[in-house]
Image (cartoon, rainbow, N blue to C red):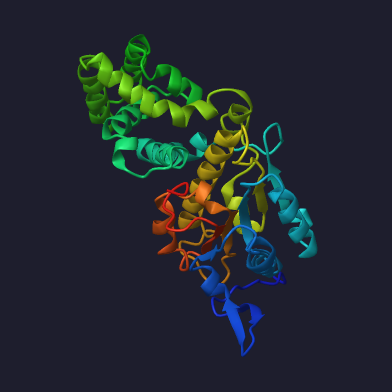
Amino acid sequence: MANEKIVKWELDDVLLTLHARDEDINITVGQTCEGIMVMGASGSGKTSGPLNTIQLAQMRKGFGMLNLCVKKDECERVCKLAKLAGRGKDVRIMRLGGDVRFNFLDSLRDGGADAVTSAFRQINQALLGQVEENEWTMASQQHLSNLVKLFLLAGKKLEVSELRLAADNLETHKQLLNQAEQRVNYDTPDAHTLKMVAAYFAQEWKGMGEKTKGSIIMSLTPTMNPFSDGPMRELFCKDSNFNPKMLRDGTILIVDIPCVDEMGVYGISAGVIMKYMVQRMIAGYYGNGKTKADNTTRPVCIVCDECHYLTTTTDSEFVTTSRSMRGSLFGSSAEFGLTSNGG
């Protein structure tokens, strides 16, 4: 509407002022978009002090937010902050058995096999606590990439459980190749892609030793299994009523799937995939048809207390450009020298 007030977020705007002993210290919007890390021993006041103070200021400033819950009481903490900031109506909670659902493979479909492989690689890193290549082998990446391409060429919906079931099924490979051959127009680039995929499954994979195949499948299954059945499949592999772009409009999404109990593998998998998807959104969507972020782009912050459970290699890459994209990572941890999962 013509009279609608345009809200602006200048990078130099003061978000909050910390009152130190000898001086007042201003923290700006731009500084929070460069990334924030709170370090300290357990019980040192990381959460009750700087985390609460800065996150509350971000909420009051109108930030969109993704809050990843490592601990069981984290959701309650964030809801209290949102209510205190007058943002209670902006809160949505994603939890097992809940009504907030997001099919991440549907969102990655346009990015093709590379986007899907990258997403699963992040989960693999967090679950195994390693970033070394031998934990996510080139052969595993190649197999998953070709599998995704085969599904897309055959016109099949990307679904984690279906990818898992097809991973080592030669008959399924043959059926999908036949379906792809019937669909692909041989005057398009897809024809060459199909040629390469067919060569992989009909020759390379079929002729591979059983021990090598077993190692590849064993490397893939830890990342796929959490999403292949049960409540995680309902949450992440069916229909969607949430889109990360909603955070640019001011939604505060709390992923209330803790990482520290018997369901920890679900929490880590959910937290890592949502963090990755929101990072992708921040890097490519600025609202209202804008092709780059400006002072009318609402900042979005990804918050995680005890973030060493969910750290992956994309985080360091993200923070190098997050300021210009009006995005932010805000974490706290009692782990020092962390890389991934405290490693």
Image position of 14 with respect to 64: above or below: below
Residue 141 pos. (x, y %): 32, 33
The image quadrant where one finds the N terminus is bottom right
Q: Is residue 55 above or below residue 145?
A: below
Q: Position of residue 92 (x, y in %)?
A: 71, 47
Q: Is residue 123 left or right of residue 296?
A: left
Q: Report which quarter residue 124 is drawn in.
A: top left
| Residue for point 62% across, 63% down | 46
In the shown orientation, is residue 23 left or right of residue 222?
right
Of 272 and 13, which appears nearest the observer? 272
User: In the rendered picture of this protein, how many numbered marks are placed on residues?
Assistant: 0
Residue 121: x and y, percent?
40, 39
Q: Is residue 301 left or right of residue 91?
A: left
Task: Say which of 86 and 70 sits in front.
Answer: 70
Q: Is residue 91 visible?
A: yes
Q: Nearer the viewer, residue 339 or 28?
A: 339
Q: Position of residue 257 (x, y in %)?
A: 64, 40
Q: Which residue does the image show at 58% across and 36% down from the upper left?
A: 264
For residue 158, say whether it is visible.
no
Tell me which residue sits at (63%, 64%) in the image.
44
Q: Residue furthest top?
A: 171
Q: Answer above or below: position of 34 versus 112.
A: below
What residue lies at 36% left-to-right and 23% top-to-bottom?
A: 217
Please name whichever residue, 267 or 326, is drawn nearer the observer in this view of the structure.
267
The quarter holding residue 26 reads bottom right
